[in-house]
Amino acid sequence: MSDIERQKDSPSPGPSLTVIYSLIVLALVAAIGFALLIVLPFYNRR
């Protein structure tokens, strides 16, 4: 079996799950921080 045929049979490597989950966590942290920046002035005024 040649290298080309072997590459065709094996699935192509997709994006790393670690990178995807890290980006999701980073987006969640950024969204929570942004929401806190909006809410805190109203909370402190009370």
Image (cartoon, rainbow, N blue to C red):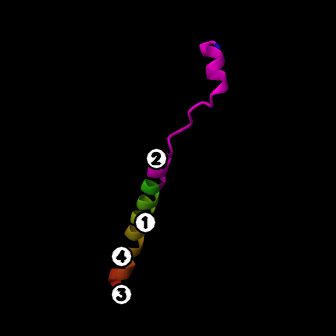
According to the picture, the residue beneath numbered tag 2 turns out to be 18
- The amino acid pointed to by label 2 is Thr
Question: In the image, which is nearer the foreground, mark 3 or mark 1?
Answer: 1
Most prominent secondary structure in the magenta stretch?
Answer: helix
According to the picture, the residue beneath numbered tag 3 turns out to be 46
According to the picture, the residue beneath numbered tag 1 turns out to be 32
Q: Earlier in the sequence, mark 4 or mark 2?
A: 2
Alpha-carbon distance for marks 2 and 3?
42 Å
Q: Looking at the image, which residue sits at the far front?
A: 1
Q: Position of residue 1 (x, y in %)?
A: 65, 14
Within 10 angstroms of label 1, few (less than 14), some, or many (20 or more) residues? few
Q: Earlier in the sequence, mark 2 or mark 3?
A: 2
Alpha-carbon distance for marks 4 and 2?
36 Å
Q: Looking at the image, which residue sits at the far top?
A: 2
According to the picture, the residue beneath numbered tag 4 turns out to be 41
Local secondary structure at mark 2:
helix
Q: Position of residue 33 (x, y in %)?
A: 39, 64
- The amino acid pointed to by label 3 is Arg
Q: Earlier in the sequence, mark 3 or mark 1?
A: 1
- The amino acid pointed to by label 1 is Ile
Question: In the image, which is nearer the foreground, mark 2 or mark 1?
Answer: 2
Q: Earlier in the sequence, mark 4 or mark 3?
A: 4
Question: In the image, which is nearer the foreground, mark 4 or mark 2?
Answer: 2
- The amino acid pointed to by label 4 is Pro
In magenta, the rendered stretch is 2-24
Within 10 angstroms of label 4, few (less than 14), some, or many (20 or more) residues? few
Alpha-carbon distance for marks 2 and 1?
21 Å
